[in-house]
Image (cartoon, rainbow, N blue to C red):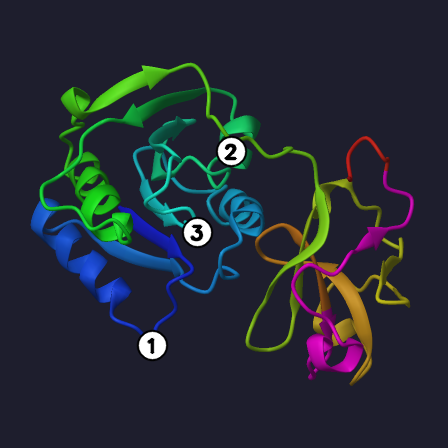
Amino acid sequence: MLLLMTDYGWQDPYVGQVKAVLATHAPGVAVIDLLHAVPDFNPHAGAHLLAALCRDLPAGAVVLAVVDPGVGGPRAAVVVEADGRFFVGPDNGLLSVLAGRAQAARIWRIDWRPQPCSDSFHGRDLFAPIAGWIAAGDFPADKHTPVAELEVRFDTAELPRILYIDHYGNAWSGIRGGIAEPGSNVEVKGHVLPWRRVFVEAGKGEAFWHVNSSGLIEIAVNRGSAAEKLGLKVGDPVRLQGAPETQVH
């Protein structure tokens, strides 16, 4: 299983170009589009989304993750094995939250550079071949160097901000639902929102929060858009009332 998570979007040729390379290096391996709408140029949001979306992947799964505003610069390229799953991408913090939360993790710096290699499209030319080889069962050890840790590491605590807004207008936060007490309130943009277990328990047009299917606190409106109703955007602060400060910062 090989999954893709990027900020490439669908309207441009980038996803298709990456998939063409993956098909060359991992023929017959299923390629799954996990998300191509990570907030642009935002590896911090991407790191928390990646950790949430990949929490239930089976051992052996390979994820090619690219949110890489520093492509072509000095940032390293890495492979992370976290609890038996492999992640390939830039060392800019994107892979650091899932690595930091893993019970066991190993890290390799990718030393190999193909020729030719675009300075601005490492997702296609560098990361995709590596991910394809791993997914095909041929870990390219001669192209990596083991390292003790990632160079860029984000805090693994909850991130009390909006990370992502889906097409319904539901706003995903970086706070995992496991630390929330049902009945607590969430504050965002001057609004204090009640908890509802599911949409049907909220009145039509009511804004509320719940724990979404990816395990994150989500701000929603029953049969409406929370982003429009509350004026929300990616990066807005979110406060879970009663949450320990050591867990959310």
Residue at position x 50%, y 41% in the image: 55
Disc marking residue 96: 2
Residue at position x 64%, y 33% in the image: 155
Left-right relation of 110 to 197? left
| Secondary element at tag 3 | loop
Q: Determine which residue is flagged by label 1.
A: 11
- Magenta span: chief secondary structure: loop
Please tell me which of labels 3 and 2 falls first in the chain. 3
Coordinates of residue 59 in the picture (x, y in percent): 35, 33
Residues rendered magenta in the picture = 220-243
* C-alpha span from label 2 to label 1: 28 Å
The amino acid sitting under disc 1 is Gln
In this view, the mark in front (1 or 3): 3
Up the image or down, 227 lies above or below 110; here it is below
In this view, the mark in front (3 or 2): 3
Q: Is 161 in front, or is 33?
A: 161
Q: Is residue 54 magenta?
A: no
Up the image or down, 231 lies above or below 236; here it is below
The amino acid sitting under disc 2 is Ser
Q: Determine which residue is flagged by label 3.
A: 69
Crowd tier of the residue under label 2, counting other residues whose Cα lies within 10 Å: few below 14, some 14–19, many 20 or above: many
Coordinates of residue 79 in the picture (x, y in percent): 33, 31
